[in-house]
Image (cartoon, helix red, strand yellow):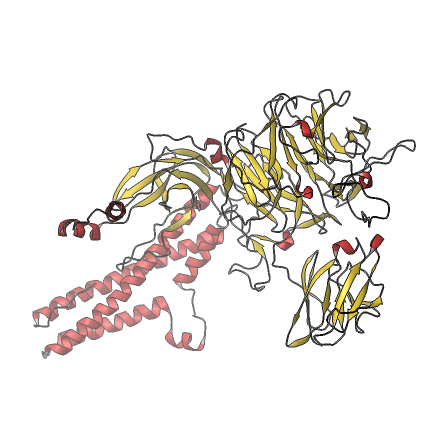
Amino acid sequence: QPDVIYAAIELDRRKGGVYRSTNRGASWTKMSDEVSGGTGPHYYQELYACPHRFDRIYLVSNYLVRSDNGGKSFERVNVKNKHVDDHAIAFRANDPNYLLVGTDGGLYESFDDSKTWRYVSNLPVTQFYKVAVDDAQPFYNVYGGTQDNNTQGGPSRTDNIHGIQNSDWFVVLGGDGHQPATEPGNPNIVYAQWQQGNLMRHDRRTGENVYIQPMAAPDEPAERWNWDAPIVVSPHNPAHLYFASQRVWKSTDRGDSWETLSEDLTTNTERIETPFFGTTQGWDNPWDIYAMSNYSTITSLGVSPVQQGLIYAGTDDGLIQVTEDEGKNWRKIRLNSLPGLPSTAFVNDIKADLHNANKVYAVFDNHKFGDYTPYLYKSVDKGKSWTKITNDLPDRTLLWRIVQDHENPELLFLGAEFGVYFSHNGGKNWKALKGGLPPIAVRDLAIQQRENDLVLATFGRGFYILDDYSALRKYNEVDSEKEALLYPPRDGWWYKPQSPLGSWGISQGDQHYMAPNPPFGVEFTYLLHEVYKSTTAKRKEIEKKRKKENQPLSFPGWEAVETEMREQAPRVWLFVTDEQGDVIRRVEATNSKGYQRVVWDLKKASRKPVLNDGAGLGGDSGNDAAPGVYFAQLFSDLNGELGAVSDRVEFVVKPLREGTLRGVLPAAVVAFQDEMETLFGRNSTADKLFSETQKSMNRMAEAYRRSGTRSVDAERGLQNLRENMEQFDLQWYGSKARREVGEKEEHHSLGQYLYKAAAGGGVLTYGPTATQRQAAEYASQLLSEKEKALSTIRENMEQLGSLLKQSGVAHWEIH
């Protein structure tokens, strides 16, 4: 029925209706007064026509509704076990029972016409307004207020091999989440709020929430809270809070009671009296401010950690207010007094400098008036004068929040509409930080000072963490005497990663979402000033330049080309050494210009044997290195010649935790691992040698067969050798007959003792048990017997070989 069209119309005061046309819009019939509910038609109101059933239409709303008669009547669609607030619907052409619905809570699909719903749980697309971090040990938590998906918290990393799962996250408070806050030194206290300043104090130990929003007295005007009201935990006392409506409030007892530090700091403007479209509007204008933020509210608070009592408050109606005496007196700053800033701008953020009481930073936004100019300002006199510091930021880039490094006062980070920027010189210049970050709105950012992590809250792609940005503190500091800069890393945690979903990965399917952990071990950041180039690469660079200059090329000569072809590719290595200067491991790094990262996984170099085909058993990764002090340094490898190219840095590897039961010291665990590695290496060498002995025996027998000679002693010797080899195979590798039917051996094998013993080296906090040490002793005894028996076989084979050669048998090799 292509002539039939449906329309959902919004009229005045959140009223409206559904209309239907049978002639492609030439005329319309009102079918009903149905209109999207909840926060109102302005938030929903899309109509979808079912492709499988004529006159079935869906109207998205806070609760999805459906009509089977072209809009005359509607009924709610089942939303049990599904998030509400629907916005989009998709159908499947060949399945009339299939629905895919996009909601404030994500994607849901139904295969039975909405009777049941399946949630798509592997899409990290949460919209975060704001972020806070705590100082929990050993891994801190990240908290965020979301668009209609609660205030959530979760770990910055886990101690397992899988990463951070959805199940690691927890809800602190329901509804729309906004600015959270945490208490320094007490990660069990979290502050969260839903819109309009409904503030709660959450106790992580009990899971309880205490409602702590301050309130006006009966003879005072009601508080006007912004949709996303600002809260700050005092940098001078962790039990003190600052919160703001149109007034600034302070609590000295974690929100149990409050006092005001100001009167109304806004212009107290009646919003419907403000000009729109060049003029003021009358009462009959189609006003709809239901479920909107209040107006004339404080949107941002900045509390100086340097000067107690210095507080900044920014509003949504054109003001910044400053007090230097904890609210006794306030100084008003009109936004249009800042150079180039419109009076209509919204104060997105205001931050007191962490190092200098006179400095303050402010971020503004004027996009509601069609202005996408970036507005970022800095004051060095407590707001008396301002300088715009957007400088080389891109045009048409909305700015959201700013944070300052706690060690380098010149290092700033800026959240913007399409990513994040940093400045190493106090805002004179800005550079985008990429590193895999999508072009998404970074609505807020926070620094976890203990870890030097930058945490980003994006509006649509969840959280991102830049681990250990400390190298940026020395951005542009170049040591001309060194070819590379290796920055001191964070200390490494020594532990055995857990595997709660199984040691072989996961079997929950691709729907099971897991965010990656930071790399296990110690992660190093380094700066390579130039890439190391091969002779071939250097020649091609010269030739490229000559081509560009229209100069002829020449043949470099056979010797030069031969040298190029035999040259080894340049490489860069990270050498890890212990306190005695012994090399523990060398890890290949990236040979690329600029900032790079390389990870040492806390493993020592492998001591496993390298077999005669050049392959090492288990690769180059050996046993665990013990906790302690280590050093690292970068080396270039130019055609096999190694040279140090950076300074040496020191770091510590320390145990993450102690076990419930007291075991041996970590050094003893590592020593046992080394002992087991030696035993496994000896056994592998014996296995390889036995295999080569079998091949040599077969070559010897074939050479005798081809020789055309006849020797009874040689034939008896070959037969005895074969019988000894078969007996060796039976004794050390088991019965072929038992193996064929799956029957166990009569006695424990050497391999079984080895693996039983090796389990003791895998428990880092406890070490090997007495039984595991006994297994190692048994394995060592049996291995000595195995090596002795194999040595006897090879001696006999050597003697037999001499006899055969004396008999004129052709030459062969014994390996």
Residue 634: x %, y % from top left: 35, 39
Residue 373: x %, y % from top left: 60, 39
Q: Is residue 757 left or right of residue 406?
A: left
Q: Is residue 547 left or right of residue 123?
A: left
Quarter placement of the N terminus: bottom right
Which residue is pictured at 81% across the width and 74% down the height?
69
Q: Is residue 303 visible?
A: no
Locate residue 132: give its quadrant.
top right
Residue 159: x %, y % from top left: 56, 48
> Is residue 812 placed above or below 741 in the rendered structure?
above
Q: Is residue 11 visible?
A: yes
> Is residue 264 placed above or below 613 in the rendered structure?
above
Q: Is residue 187 left or right of residue 292?
A: left
Locate residue 645: give its quadrant.
top left
Which residue is pictured at 55% across the width and 60% down the height?
502
Which residue is pictured at 70% across the width and 40% down the height?
180
